[in-house]
Amino acid sequence: MLESLYVLILVGAALIVVAAFSSLLAFRFGAPLLLLFLSIGLVAGVDGIGIDFDNAGLAYFVGTIALAIILFDSGFGTRMSTFRQAAAPAIMLATVGVFLTAVLFGLAATYLLGIPLVEGLLLGAIVGSTDAAAVFFLLRVGGITVRERVRSLLEIESGTNDPMAIFLTIALVEAIRAGGGIETLGADVALGLLSQMLIGLVGGVLGGMTIAAVIRRLAIDRGLLPIVTLSLALCVFAAVGAVGGSGFLAVYVAGLYTGNAKLSNAAAVKRFQDGLTWLAQIVMFLILGLLATPSQFSDILWPALGLAAFLIFVARPFAVWLCLIPFDFQRREMAFVSWVGLRGAVSILLAIVPLIGGLDDSRLFFNAAFIIVLASLLVQGWTIASVAKRLGLVVPPRIGAVEKYELELPGSADHESPLLPRR
């Protein structure tokens, strides 16, 4: 028994180490790093090395916690001035944009996969939101420097569009389980969405105020401070979700409030979160890769690739164009925003919901979503830098990406920069 425990720990730690070292190859050859993490999980899985992992519930649990950590960190690192200048168009994309993308994609999925409309819309909801982990990595760590307004729009959109996709996915799964169609999705569904958003927003603000107050008033040891901060953030996420709100929106808003609260130890908290966010991304992508069975992909490979192309070149651009018309964005900026609509772990995570719900076509949804995510990370993730240059949107960075991120940490009154001597 103990020997098997040691083997399990060894395999898990080895996969994380391999994923971490793969970053050297990613930065050298310009490969999408999160695609490498996902690929390592696929190689280690049942059709590769042979690790047989088939626990959808555990994968969803781990992925949910990892995503909450990533969203809190992304909110913590967003300046309020940046949020204000791009909040309106970002929220439009995070709500109306996700809905439009899901509907357009759902119609195409119904035709290409030969499934009922309600199931096509379910697949559209699953892949309707952009992936926060992928977008934040590319824009903050990947060395892509674009206009502040465009960058802010993309970050805020990816941090706030998950609630819409999650709500639509769960509502459609429940409708299919009940044997109904889209006619069952009426005013109650819309009111439920508004309720989740409102509770998530209020809970996030109150949670952020609580976290900031605890950090200010309690003499917490510097080593424990980041742990307490993150634990409180997860409490906000869980508490808001338990009362029927959007925990993902709440944890992002809590991070936004806390990161802009002018805390004296914000830099120390941020450094801890950087490392933990990396670990969360690696573990999430690895475990989602392990859950997949590539030998099943051949059954729907070409229709799924056709849907990926439709999503990249039709559904996402149309939704972006329609949502950004009132906000005076240039055409090239709209084109770039469309291209950075990466799908990632969130879509795979949502594709687990039909598995947990026991739907008849649950594996179809999961496999199709997985192929679409792979295509998105491969096509869009690998070309974002070149697209930004071709559109003339790249601006010279003031300082290095990592240094800039630390020195301009929002609300921090006591930075400890690696460029300055320690006190």
Image (cartoon, rainbow, N blue to C red):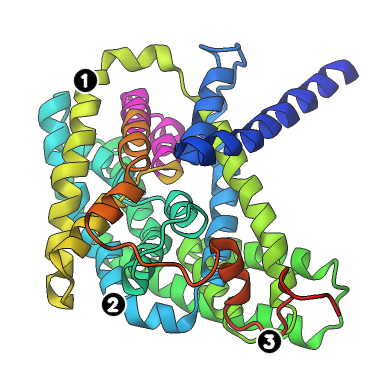
Asked if the residues shown at circle 3 and circle 1 are in contact, with their CB atoms under 8 angstroms apart, the answer is no
> In the displayed structure, would residue 22 be above or below residue 411?
above
At horizontal 41% and vertical 62% (from top left) the residue drawn is 145
Task: Please tell me whether mark 2 or mark 3 is closer to you in this view.
Answer: 3
At horizontal 13% and vertical 76% (from top left) the residue drawn is 326
Task: Please tell me whether mark 3 or mark 1 is closer to you in this view.
Answer: 3
Residue 43, image x, y percentages: 54, 19
Give the residue pinned by disc 3.
Answer: 413
Left-right relation of 295 to 240: left
277 or 339: nearer the viewer: 339
Kindly indicate the quadrant of the structure image that contains residue 175: top left
Which range of residues does the magenta coloring cover? 347-370
Q: Residue 409 carries which label?
A: none
Q: CA separation, marks 1 and 2?
A: 37 Å
Crowd tier of the residue under label 1, counting other residues whose Cα lies within 10 Å: few below 14, some 14–19, many 20 or above: some
Residue 80, image x, y percentages: 47, 82
Label 1 amino acid? Trp
Residue 70, image x, y percentages: 56, 56
Q: Which quarter of the figure is the C terminus placed in?
A: bottom right
- Which of the marked residues, 2 or 3, is nearer the chain's N terminus? 2
Give the residue pinned by disc 1.
Answer: 302
Residue 186 appears in view: no
Crowd tier of the residue under label 2, counting other residues whose Cα lies within 10 Å: few below 14, some 14–19, many 20 or above: some
